[in-house]
Every structure is written in C-alpha cells, then in structure tokens.
Amino acid sequence: MTAIDTRPPTDTRAVTTGDARRPGHGHRRRLGGTNWTLTVVLGLAALTVLIPLYVTVAMAFKTSEQSVDGNALSLPFPFNPGSFASAWELTRFPVSFSVSLGVAALTVVATLLLSSFASYAIVRNWHKRFFRWSFVYLLAAMFLPFPVVALPQIKLTAQMGLDNPIGVGILHAMFQLSFSVLLYSAYLRSIPVELEESARIDGASTWQIFWRIILPLLGPMNATVGIFAFLASWNDFMMPSLITADPTLQTLPVVQNIFQSQFGTNYNVAFASYLMAMAPTIIVYLFAQRWVISGVTQGAVKS
C-alpha cells in the first residue's frame, strides 16, 4: 500500500532566490542605508541656526568700522575683544544677569513644583469630573497669549506690590503651567499604578508616595519642563518690560533694547552683548538636550 504525500508543493523560485525572498529582508536593507533626502533637509535646517550663530560671534569680535562694512559673513580682522568690555559696562551686565538668573530660577522651581503637583492629581483622579475639567481648563489657557491680558496683569501686579522681578517670575510660571501639565500628564500615565498601590499597602501616604516614588521617576520630564521654562523666561522681553517698574531691575533682554536706539550703530557692541546673553542658554541646552528628547518620547507611548 503506497503512502500518499500530502505536503504542499515546493516553490522552487523561493528556494533559488535564497535570502532575497525572505520577508523583511529588503526592508532591513533599506533601513541600513542613508536617506540622503532627509540628510540634506536636516543639513539645511542646521544652517538656519549655525549661520546666525556664526554672524553673532564674528560681529562681536569686529571693530566698529568692520561691523558697518556691509559684509556680515567676513572674519573679524583685526581681532577686537574690546566690544565685550563696552557691552559689560553699558548693560550693567552683572546686575542684569543676576536679575535674569533670579527670575529664571524662580520660574523653573515654581513651574516644576506646581505642574508636577497638578498633573499627579489630575492623572490619578481622572475618573472625577472636576479633575477632567481642570485639565481642559489648563489646556484652554494655552491659547491665551500674554498681550491679551497684559493690562489687567500690570494693574494687578502693581496693586499687590509684585511689579518687580519676583512678580515676573510668578507670571512666567503661571503661563508655563498649561504646557507643562500637558507634558507631565502624558508622562505620568506611563508610570504603573501598582507601584503606588504597593507603597500604600506598606502604609505610605500620598505625599510620601509622590516625593519618594513619583518625583524620582519624573527625572527626564523634570529636565524637559525645566529647560522649556528656563528658555521661555530667559528670552522673554515683553512681560519684564511691562511688569517691572524699576528700570534698574530689568532683565537682560530689556536692557539690551538700548542698542536699538541710542547705540544703534555700534553693532559690534550689540552683538557682543547678545552673545553674552546667549551663552547661558546654549550651555544649559548642550548639557541637558538628551533629557529633553528622552522626556518627550518616553511620555508618548503608554506602557
């Protein structure tokens, strides 16, 4: 009695072609190559940042005659570092830098604390209507720019005695709250609730859970929110110029406005001042940029 072969016929074409017919083989090969279109686009995008930065550095080291010759891309020759000394004196740089640093520090600390508190309460009480509507309210505030409420804010800060750098830092934190809560909420949803439940079984309170478990896990997002808050506060011009009543306590961006009027032709001094003001933001971002990327991407997908 002859056995019947029930196996499906073999496709000889698949055998002869080998790995070329394997599923995903060509896809893996394409992933390993270089995407020249994307590389060129990224290179052009990088030039939009590198060229202005080069012009700023080159103009800062030029003489007054070189800065008005109409060739911003030329190298500084002779080399003139004296522009920084002039900018240091004209902007009262130690005072202005200290004020800007204090405002930015207050903004970062207040933003981190208030945003993390609010986000934790909202995410862990999402089943309650009040917290859901609070989240919607905060998101709606993102579409409310400062110029719309500038006059009421000026009047309120003056009446409360906050027409000073402290008031500016508080307002900066308030306007950063909406975006920061959005980032924190997405990140907190990726943290397992089982960690908190285990701590509650051991007798931990809500505050202990937040400070000892949740806050350490928010490290990447704390860095992300802190960087955004620092950059927004350090570079802001409109709010300090309208809120701060004492001109001797203005931040660096406001003080540098003198180069747009009285010293409008001293481009080398102006760019030297701009470069000194840019240095802290560049340094902070270079050291913390990896935290910014990881914080945003880790909160994008819920585990």
Image: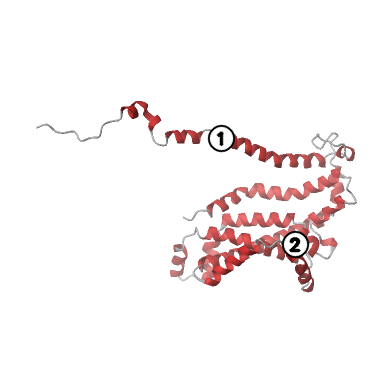
Left or right: 27 with respect to 122?
Answer: left
Query: Badge 2 local density, few (<14 within 10 Å), some, or many (20+)?
Result: few
Left or right: 16 with respect to 297?
Answer: left
- Looking at marks 2 and 1 on the same chain, the residue that comes earlier in the sequence is marked by 1
> At which x and y percent is residue 199?
46, 66
> At which x and y percent is residue 267?
85, 44
**Helix, strand or loop at mark 1:** loop
> At which x and y percent is residue 228?
66, 55
Q: Is residue 199 above or below residue 86?
A: below
**Helix, strand or loop at mark 2:** helix
Rendered residue at 51%/67% (across/down): 126
Residue tagged by mark 2? 147
> At which x and y percent is residue 61?
82, 40
Rendered residue at 63%/35% (across/down): 40
Mark number displayed over residue 96: none
Question: How has the structure been colored for display?
Answer: secondary structure
Instruction: Say if residue 159 shows up in the picture.
Output: yes
Instruction: Say if residue 217 shows up in the picture.
Output: no
Q: Where is residue 80, by image quadrant?
A: top right
Check the picture and name the quadrant holding the N terminus: top left
Q: Where is residue 115, by image quadrant?
A: bottom right
Circle 2 or circle 1, nearest the eye: 2
Q: Is residue 165 above or below residue 299?
A: below
Front position in the image: 87 or 148: 148
Q: Where is residue 253, by image quadrant?
A: bottom right
Which residue occupies the extreme bottom position in the image? 159
Q: Is residue 125 above or below residue 272?
A: below
Residue tagged by mark 1? 35
Q: Amino acid at mark 1?
A: Asn
Left or right: 136 with respect to 231?
Answer: left
